[in-house]
Amino acid sequence: MMRAVIPESDLPLFTAASRKFLTISELNELVKGTLESHLDALWLQGEISNFRVPPSGHCYFTLKDDKSQISAVMFRRQGMRLRFTPENGMAVLCFGRVSLYSVRGDLQFYVDDMEPQGQGALYLAFEQLKIKLAAEGLFAPERKRALPFLPRSIGIVTSDRGAALHDLLRIIGDRFRDRRIVIRPVMVQGEGAAREIAEGITDLNRFGEIDVIIVGRGGGSLEDLWAFNEEIVARAIYASQVPIISAVGHEIDFTIADFVADHRAPTPTAAAEMVLPRKADLLEQVSVLDDQLLRSMELKLETSREAYRGLAKRLADPRRKLRENQQRLDELSVDLLRRFQERLRQFRERLAKDTGRLSALSPLAVLDRGYSITHKLPEEQIVKDAASLNIGDRLRITFAAGKSLCRVEGKE
């Protein structure tokens, strides 16, 4: 009997005797292990969309190009290391691994690190934070305070091992040795540096008796200076009750701290020169002002002397003026007496003329010429007509010299 031989390639995958089934979970784990063993570390280039951050702090988003997309997740621990904030539409480079979320069978890319494509992550983070804080008013010019003149106590927040502190102490000591300096040493770069700087600013404010605070460090790369670009430092500077000078890096370096601080110094050395003038310069300035004041006083005195001399010339001797006034009074008295006598003479002449005219008109003058005036008694009426008389009427006759009483005995 012939037995047909079936080629092994034509046998079914599972024979009845050796049939084996995979569960969905086993399949997903198998796929997951295969993916992670072959795609455990790689860079992906794509655009972010559907970006969201739930309360857990993990970042969920989609990475896509013009043809395909893949779900991505960045866990909270990795996300906290980012210097910038991912946004929808942002082109990024993501480093991580491809795996399968076995619960749902979803293919996902697990991101360990991310950089913005076309510009550095630090630069993007700098610009994002700058826009955010500017919108909140932390850079507003009207809130910036003037520096105190000759502060008695100066606070410094910087590393106690850097050259910046040495330069600050040297310049301040050269200018005013009697100034009180309170140093709050902090880390100025590396992990945790930003928090230390913010705490240092807060501590000096809490300490009190500080007139001005210098916050800064020497030069370095953008990464070295990054602690001064952190939001926590910016908000600590904004909350300070004491005016703050930001002195970070070199003249070409700009940080977020520079924009928030009341004043920016291009270098720590410049900050020391800004906070305190040179004592020798002040003394020289005082000397110049003193000379100017003396010259001004001398000029004022000379002007006053000239004015006094002019007034003295215009002011005569009061005794001479008194004698002149006495003489003038005598002259006026004589003139007044002469005028009075002349006026009196004129009045006498006028009175004599008026008296003559009155005498001529007086009835007494008529009596002098032999005439008389007869009054009827008791009415005292002047008798002008004999017809008005009756026999027996009593009369009084006035003569030029004397009077007589008579009675009418007859009339004609």
Image (spheres, grey):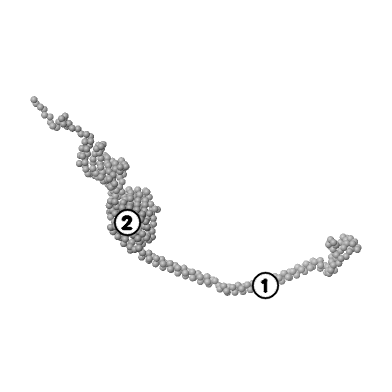
- Could you say which is closer to the camera, residue 339 or residue 320? 320
Q: Quick one: 91 or 145, which is closer to the camera?
A: 145
Kindly indicate the quadrant of the structure image that contains residue 211: bottom left
| Image disc number at residue 184 | 2
- Going by the numbered disc 1, the residue's amino acid type is Leu
- In terms of sequence position, does the residue under pointer 2 or pointer 1 come before the other? 2
Q: Is residue 166 above or below residue 24?
A: below
Which residue is depicted at the point 24% across and 37% down?
A: 102
Q: Which residue is mark 1?
A: 337
Q: Secondary structure at mark 1?
A: helix
Q: Quadrant of residue 294?
A: bottom left
Q: Marks 1 and 2: in contact by CB < 8 Å?
A: no
Q: Residue at x 39, y 65 (%)?
A: 285
Percent of width and height locating residue 145: 39, 55
At 41% across and 68% down in the image, what residue appears? 291
Q: Evaluate whether residue 315 shows in this view.
A: yes
